[in-house]
Image (tube, helix red, strand yellow):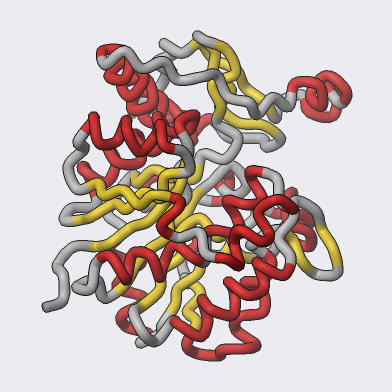
Amino acid sequence: MPSPDEHYVTLFDQAFLPYGMALHASLMRHGEPFRLWVVCLDEVVEQRLRQLALPGVETIALAAIEDADLLRVKPTRSRAEYCWTLTPCTFAAVFAHAPEAQRVTYIDSDVWLVSSPGPIFAELDAAGADVLITDHGFAPRYAHLGARSGRFCVQFLVARRGGSDAIIGWWRERCLEWCYDRYDAGRFGDQKYLDRWQELFGARVRVLEHPELTQAPWNVERFRPEQAAIFHFQGFRRVAERTVMLYYGYRVPDHAERFYRGYLADFRAALERLETLGVRVPVSRYRPLKRLKASLMRLVGTTRFVPLDWAGSGPA
C-alpha cells in the first residue's frame, strides 16, 4: 500500500549531526507526516541517531549502499566528492528499504523547511513528471556562477518510484565516471549533470517553476521571506566552540535574518541536546579563513560571524 508519508533522504557524518537535527526539527514543524532516511557516513553518527531516537528518522549504514562500483572510485575522491558520488545512490536505497514509498526526496543536510513543501510536490503531481529539480535562481550579481556550478541545485530533488529509474541511473553512472570539486568540460561535481536532463529526458523532468520556494544566500535578495518553503544554509559553519559563520561569499540582505535566527536556534538546541548525552560535536573542518584574509577587501560584506548565542534583531 502506498505510504502517506513523504520520504526524505539525506547523508552526513558526525560533524554534521547538528545540521541533520535542525533539518529534522523543521520537518517536525512543516513536513509531517514524513520519514527521514539518513545515510550514515560513519558509525558514530549511526550510533548517535539510534541513541537520539528522533521521531520519523531511519538510518542506513554506509556499507549497505557501498557496492563494488562505489568502492572502486572511493579512493579517488575527497570526502566531499564521495558524498556527491553517493547522492544518486540514495534513492534506490530508500526504495529498497521502504517498498511503500512512491517517491523519495533527496534533501541536503543543511536545508531547513520554513513552511510546508506541499506546493513543490503539488507541482510535480500536476505535471505528471518522474523527477523534479530546482533552479539555483541566482540573483543577477551571481548569475555568472551558473556557468561553473550549474543552473540547477541538487539541494531538493524528488524522484518517483519506477519512472525515475533511467534518469537517476544515468546520473549515477556519470557520477561514478567523474565527480570532482572542479569544473571540467561542462562537469562540476554531481550537480552540473542536471543541466542535461531536460534535453535527455524531456517532460519526464520537471523544473520547479517557482524559485522563490527554494531560497539560499545566492538568491534570497530576489525574494520575500514569506515566499520560501525551504532555505539552504550553504556556508553556515561553527568555526569555533562559540562562533558561527552564517554565510560566506554572498551579500545576504537584512530581511533574511529571520531565517538565520531561526536556524541558529535549532542548531544550538541540537548542540545542547547532544551535550546532555555527553556527545561533543567537533568544530567544522570547513575553514575558509585563509581565503577570507587573502581577499578581504573583495569580500567585505559577504561574510558574517556571530556568537553561538546570537539571537538576531528585528521582526521574526
Residue at position x 36%, y 29% from top?
A: 262
* Position of 115 relative to 146 (above/below): above
Q: Does 188 sit above or below residue 75?
A: below
Q: Is residue 84 left or right of residue 102?
A: right
Residue 1 left/right relative to 290: left
How many labels sit on residues?
A: 0
The reply, left or right, for residue 199 in relation to residue 231 is right
> Considering only vertical position in the picture, is 102 above or below 12?
below
- Foreground residue, 296 or 25? 25
Residue closer to the observer: 254 or 53: 53
Tell me residue 292's x, y (percent).
Answer: 79, 24
Percent x, y of residue 71:
61, 58
What's the residue at 40%, 21% (across, down)? 314
Determine which quarter of the picture holds residue 164. Answer: bottom left
Image quadrant for the C terminus? top left
Q: Quadrant of residue 68?
A: bottom right
Quadrant of the drawing holding the N terminus: bottom left
**Percent x, y for residue 260?**
45, 30
Q: Residue at x 31, y 70 (%)?
A: 96
- Can residue 224 be seen here? The reply is no
Give the x, y percent position of residue 95. Answer: 32, 70
Residue at the image point whose x is 35% and y is 41% from the top: 23
Q: Is residue 267 above or below residue 221?
A: above
Residue 264 visible to an observer of this rendering:
yes
Write down the quadrant of residue 274 in the picture.
Answer: top left
